[in-house]
Amino acid sequence: MKGRLTTLGQCQMILCVASWIVPRRARAEWRKEWEAELAFAWQISQAKGESSAATRLRWRCCGAFLDAAWYRCTREDLRSTSKHWSQMPTFVLSVLFGVLLLLAGASGDFPRLRSILLRPPYGDPQHIVTVSRTGVTSSAEWVVPYFWVDIWRRHEPAVEGVAAYSWRPRAAALMISGRPAGVASVRVEDGLFQVFGVRPLLGRTSRPSDAQDYRIGLLLSYETWRRNFFCDPNILEKRATIDGQEAMIIGVLPERFWFPSADVGVWRLADKRSFSREAVGVVARLRPQVSERWAEGALQRDVSNMTGEAFWGSSLQVWPVQERIRQPLISYTVALCITLLVMIAVIWSGRLNLYPRYAGAVRACRWWTFFAIKSFLLLSILLAAVVEFTPEPYVFPPGKTTFVLESVSLWIFSVGCLFTLWWSLVDQQSRCRVCLRRLVLPAHIGGSGCLLLGWVGTELACPEGHGLLHVSETDVCWLDPAQWTQLDESWESLFSEKANDEVLG
Ligand SMILES: [Zn+2]
């Protein structure tokens, strides 16, 4: 007797769990049918006296899951449930959250966004600056002659270290152990990584002082090491070439380090001779307590004293690297603020009928919280997409044409801001002021020809019967463009699920 209870009890539990898959309305009936079948099967097995009856019965009950799933999928319920679900406020939020997760997956956890927002992987970032010329005609003239760097290195007490780099990244064909990779490369002086105070992830950042190696020294970015060489821990010992020349991998830089462009995948160490007749970009580490303005004056004086350079119409500019890296974010914030001002003006004017009038504090709070979360998710998606998937950021504008191209991302962000926030407002307007579901059953009311005689427009209803929204077809100043009519509880029976199904067919 005890055994019968246990087996039957287990089977009933299985049926109970499976019944959750069945739509709520049909659940009780579905369970009754299965339990009757179970009781019948039990009686037969008892009559036969089989020893394996209990196991067989349990397996049979597991089949209820399939039946329940089949029941749900083949009935109209699925269509109507998904339709109902898509009206819910949580649907929009989950879709937006899903898109954000997809973007995170596609970009590899937002590497660029993190490198801009998080603390950089080098020591005392506030003292690292770029030195460039301002007041020049072409944006490609901000670079300085290499011998100025030599002057500063030898004479200037304001800087702890200074290093030059070729400012234009070039495409390079890298080959390590027979595996090719096309990456952007930049030539840098040995001391550049000491100026940054960056600790390598693997190996070192400069050649050993006693090394008499003819090969080109290379440092890989974390992304190149991960994407192209699958985080190979023995990469330093492998044979490498760059553009057909023998090279050696000296080290791998930490995640989130980039300079001067996020696309640079390999840094080639170069000596003084190879830079001697070039115009170069300069990066320096200021001594503590030395301000940027003071350093500008000191560096300029040094060059004037040694070379007689008069700096007609131009001057030197000392600018913290971290500030330059975050520069695009400042432009994005300005674009966002302008869009928000426009939106606030639209909401304030009352032309959208957005405010849930006569609603209690809790409802109004829910209403605006939903709007805020939705808009925040939309803007986060936009920002992440623009930063991760457009060609930037650069520390410097390398030439006029590229500069125009770079600001494309700012254009996309500004226009995108306007569109996403506008969509958020329009979506909010077409929602029930009580339960935040999307309004349904649009009905056209009035005749377009007789505007003066009556109201013309579309009427939308809350699927739960909380109220009606009247959207005017013609924008006339004496009529509100949209009006919300709250319905009392006596209307709810009209909008009950059954009545809704009948209307929807
Ligand atoms: Zn409602």
Image: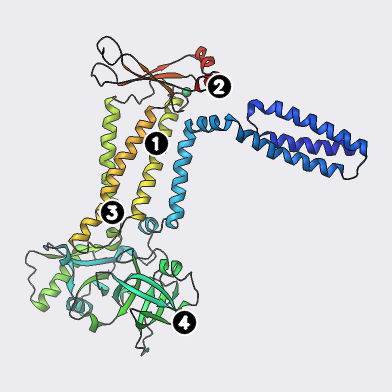
CA–CA distance between discs 4 and 1?
53 Å
Q: Quadrant of residue 242?
A: bottom left
Give the amino acid type for the residue marked by disc 2 in the picture: Glu
Tell which circle, 3 or 4, labels the residue nearer the N-terminal end.
4
The image shows residue 497 at horizontal and vertical percentages of 55, 22
Which residue is identified by label 3? 328
The image shows residue 20 at horizontal and vertical percentages of 66, 34
Q: Secondary structure at mark 2?
A: helix
Give the amino acid type for the residue marked by disc 1 in the picture: Ala
CA–CA distance between discs 1 and 3?
24 Å
Within 10 Å of disc 3 (Cα), the crowding (few <14, some 14-19, many 20+) is many
Camera-side residue of 450 and 237: 450
CA–CA distance between discs 3 and 4?
39 Å
Give the color scheme: rainbow, by chain, secondary structure or one colour: rainbow
Q: Secondary structure at mark 3?
A: helix
Give the amino acid type for the residue marked by disc 3 in the picture: Pro
Q: Quadrant of residue 348?
A: top left
From the image, state whether disc 3 or disc 4 is nearer to you: 4
Q: Secondary structure at mark 4?
A: helix
Camera-side residue of 210 and 248: 248
Which residue is identified by label 1? 372
Tell which circle, 1 or 3, labels the residue nearer the N-terminal end.
3
471 versus 325 height, above or below: above
Mark 1 sits near ligand 1, with its Cβ under 8 Å away: no
Q: Residue at x 27, y 9 (%)?
A: 453
Q: Residue at x 36, y 43 (%)?
A: 379
Which residue is identified by label 4? 237
- Is there a contact, CB below 8 Å, between mark 1 and mark 3? no
CA–CA distance between discs 1 and 2?
30 Å
Q: Residue at x 48, y 33 (%)?
A: 86
Which residue is identified by label 2? 497
